[in-house]
Amino acid sequence: METQRELEQRALGEVHSAVDTVELERLRVRYLGKKGELTARLRSLGELEPDQRPEVGRWINELRRSLEEALQERRRELAAREEASRLQAETLDVTLPGVPPSWGRRHPLRQVWEEIEDVFLRLGFDVAEGPEVETEYFNFEALNIPADHPARDMQDSFYLHGVGPGLLLRTQTSPVQIRYMQQEAPRTPLRMVAPGRVYRRDQLDASHSPVFHQVEGLVVGPGVSLADLKGVLSLFAREIFGPAAKLRFRPSYFPFTEPSAEVDVSCPLCGGRGCRTCSGSGWLEILGCGMVHPRVLREGGYDSEEVAGFAFGMGIDRIAMLRYGIDDLRLFTQNDLRFLRQF
């Protein structure tokens, strides 16, 4: 009986001194579980003398009830304490000043993209889109680019082998012009710009990227001339680079235009006086243009004897670099917030 009294005092004392519900559960298993001390004592009653069994069995049952009551009471106390502690930790001081949200902003390339679109929308141009995965016909053949042209070499273009015959990632947005003409012919006048992402096999460095952005423009109608082209591009330059911007046209060659020209803008950083950005010349190349080749007009569904057209193309990335004085193309894609927050 002395041993029984010691067990009772020890079990109840440990229950009352438990510091959390985890320890309390451990004590319940230790004493009342299937392999607990009281369960083991009940199983050992058969080892006692017959006259001792009733008294010991009654004591064990009474101790079990006492332990269950003590465990339940202690569990309520600990649960209430833990709940109060949790609420205290989660208490919010509603009088503290709030934290303002961090607002994002449009990428500088997207800003320039939309500004270019806005200029041409105000001139009555439509904005057209086309697929980035193109066929050789729309990307090359319809644009008067022959099979032996370097642009059609697999080392210069991303061909999609296994996807379909003659498929590649478009190297320019000019295919959208052909698609748009075929869709709208013989409607005139036709005015459209096609901004979008293009792909070429270039190594990534400060001035080259395998993925970049272009905007191509096209006008088709009776009596369209180089004077119209110069007027549109001059207005565009003033809207993007400022009212003092000037243009310079230099003869060039493109398969899809004839005659063709490269266009330079007076350096927006030095005002044409000459600086490191423009290599002291006062001019920066921004786009190529020309009168649409008769073969391209015919591929688009127009009679080259009845209408004429002009086309132009420029790099949105390059325009943004000139606009903001950025000297490394890679900054646009590094996602450095210190850079992006400046725009």
Image (cartoon, helix red, strand yellow):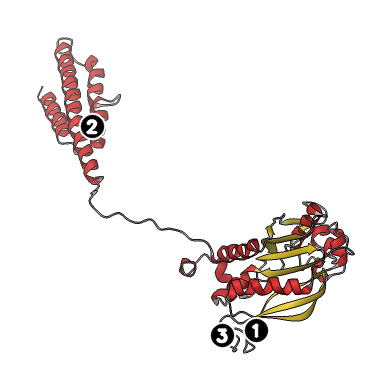
Quadrant in the picture for the N terminus: top left
Q: CA distance from mark 2 to mark 3?
A: 83 Å
Q: Residue furthest front?
A: 223
The residue sitting at the right extreme is 305
Tag shown at residue 100: none
- Asked if residue 153 shows in the view, the reply is no
Name the residue: 62% across, 69% down. 317
* Relative image position of residue 33 (x, y in whole percent): 28, 25
> Badge 1 is on which residue?
283
Residue nearer the viewer, 98 or 63:
98
Query: Which residue carries the number 2 mark?
Result: 27
Cβ–Cβ below 8 Å for labels 2 and 3?
Answer: no
Position of residue 68 relative to residue 208, above or below, is above
Residue at image mark 3 = 270
Mark in front: 1 vs 2: 1
Q: Amino acid at mark 2?
A: Leu
